[in-house]
Amino acid sequence: MSDGRASSDDVARPARLLKAVVIGLAIVLALCGMVIAGTIVYRAVNMPEPKAVNFGVSPLPLPPGCSVDYVEAEGDRLIVQVGGNDTCRRVLIADLKTGALIGQFHFPNE
């Protein structure tokens, strides 16, 4: 006969199940954290040496009578400002890894 009250066994079973799920998820979370930490440490210790690229001599177009006013290396780009007469004014941008001319900005006199 049921009088509308829950027995202690009816309350304890879901509580035990919930406790087991929480413990299982905590274990999974701890394992994931250990895998991530281990991967970070492994990659930090086993960093490959950067490979030096030798592209030899790479010509950059410099018209006759022009001079290099300014050179700057920014990231993997070489920026060369060319000056001289009005036909020389330009900025050359080259790739430092390959030595290839990527592009140039020409500033003609209007």
Image (spheres, rainbow, N blue to C red):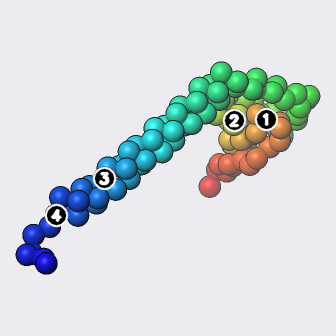
Residue that mark 1 sits on: 97
Nearest-to-viewer mark from 2 and 3: 3
Q: Which residue is mark 4?
A: 7
Vertical placement of 2 versus 90: above or below? below
Q: Is residue 58 left or right of residue 110?
A: right
Element type at mark 1: loop
Residue under pointer 2: 76
Residues at discs 1 and 2 in contact (Cβ within 8 Å): yes
**Residue 5 appears in the figure:** yes
Per the model, the C-alpha gap separating discs 4 and 2 is 73 Å
**Above or below, comparing residue 106 to residue 48 in the picture:** below
In front of the other: 75 or 45: 45
User: How many numbered discs, if any?
Assistant: 4
Query: Which percent across, then down, holds residue 100?
Result: 83, 41
Please identify, in this view, whether the residue under mark 4 or under mark 1 is nearer the observer.
4
Give amino acid for label 2: Asp
In the rendered structure, which disc, 1 or 2, sits on the residue that comes first in sequence? 2
Q: Is residue 61 left or right of residue 26?
A: right
Q: Position of residue 90 (x, y in %)?
A: 69, 43
State the separation of the CA atoms marked 4 and 1. Answer: 76 Å
Write the residue at 28% across / 60% down: 14
**Residue type at numbered disc 3:** Arg
Q: Residue 4 sits in which quadrant?
A: bottom left
* SS for callout 3: helix
Residue visible at 88% across and 28% down in the picture: 54
